[in-house]
Amino acid sequence: MQTMPKPKKKKLAAGAPRANASRAKATSKATSKATSKATSKATSKAPRSARGKPVDPRLRRTAEHEALAGVRERHQIGHLAAGRMPTGAPKLSAAAQRRIDDAIRDASPMMTEDQKLLSFAPRHSDDFTRTDTWRVMRIMGEFIEGFDKLAKVDKGVCFFGSARTAPDDPQYLAAVETAGLLAKQGFSIITGAGPGIMEAANKGAREAGGHSVGCNIELPFEQGANPYVDTLVDFRYFFVRKTMFIKYSVGYVIFPGGFGTLDELFEAVTLIQTGKISQFPVVLFGTHYWAGLVRWMQSRVLGEEKISPGDLDLLVITDDPKEAADVITAAWEVQMEEAVGVVRRQWEDQVERMEQEAKRLSESVRSRK
């Protein structure tokens, strides 16, 4: 029996769609890969935060709220570590407190005066008491009140540092000791009136029988003052308070802290660098904490000639309370010598002018004769 050959199978029309689907799948995969690569490339070029996260302007408000919550938390931790509730932090008597005036504020009660001054807001052209012009009068009043309350502080030392430092922390104990050594030498101790390092410095001054000053700042939450403040001054504006820190102190002792501490550090160094203040010691307490910053300034800032070599000599780093106090005392003595020298030169100039005037009058009398 003859076997019939098997017919060749023809490609069915249905095979075309399968081939097209296969090609489409390959094309889709290549497109997806290219898109993913382009997206990855675009993301890698996008701005990133200091933690490496892509910056999204829409999420900035969240980051700002988290930052404010962190400040509140650090104040609360500082008070709790000292054994008291944050909202019930001891203050001066009611008669000695200054009630912040709410009569001329904007609609939102939670906005601080710094926020209203610095942030964008719709203008109220029909209400003079809500304008920056009116606000200038209140700023002037705050300066006057600060000058009035701190007028007797002629030998102050400012202490800065973290608000969350607990009383059993070695840095806290070092701040107490350093402030006590300075208070015994007649220095007034000035802080931001908060917990942590600020409390430690005020405590050291109080225990040593010295004058303890607290310059409190209005914040969107109730931060309270520590119980070791003798003279408490409340401020609405950061720049007014910062002026008081500089004006009534002869030096800074800066313990480990955050952005606020770094702000005070670099502002003082800038004022020294630009000749606004002189013989003003800036002591960084805690070599381990500050070492990284100093190394960065040496290798990067100085290395790229953004500052001069002598600028780094404006900072003193130590772990010894006595050494910190000695640096402040030595600078104060030089300040006094320079002040005496200035007064002496002014007196000598005045005497010379008087002698010249007397000589001129004498010659005038002789010429008339």
Image (spheres, grey):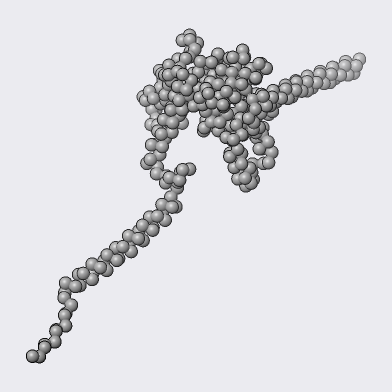
Identify the residue at image location x=39%, y=58%. Answer: 37
Near-viewer residue (8 or 62): 8
Quarter that holds the N terminus: bottom left
Residue 158 at x, y = what percent? 59, 23
Residue 31 at x, y = what percent? 32, 62
Q: Residue furthest bottom?
A: 2
Q: Residue 314 lies in what quarter of the image?
A: top right
Q: Residue furthest front?
A: 1
Identify the residue at image location x=63%, y=42%. Answer: 298
19, above or below 112, in the image = below
Identify the residue at image location x=40%, y=42%. Answer: 57
Q: Residue 307 lies in what quarter of the image?
A: top right
**Residue 151 seen in render:** no
On the picture, is 31 further left or further right than 101? left
**Residue 205 seen in render:** yes
311, above or below 230, in the image = below
Residue 352 at x, y = what percent? 82, 21
72, above or below 93, in the image = below
On the picture, is 317 further left or further right than 214? right
Near-viewer residue (353 or 83): 83
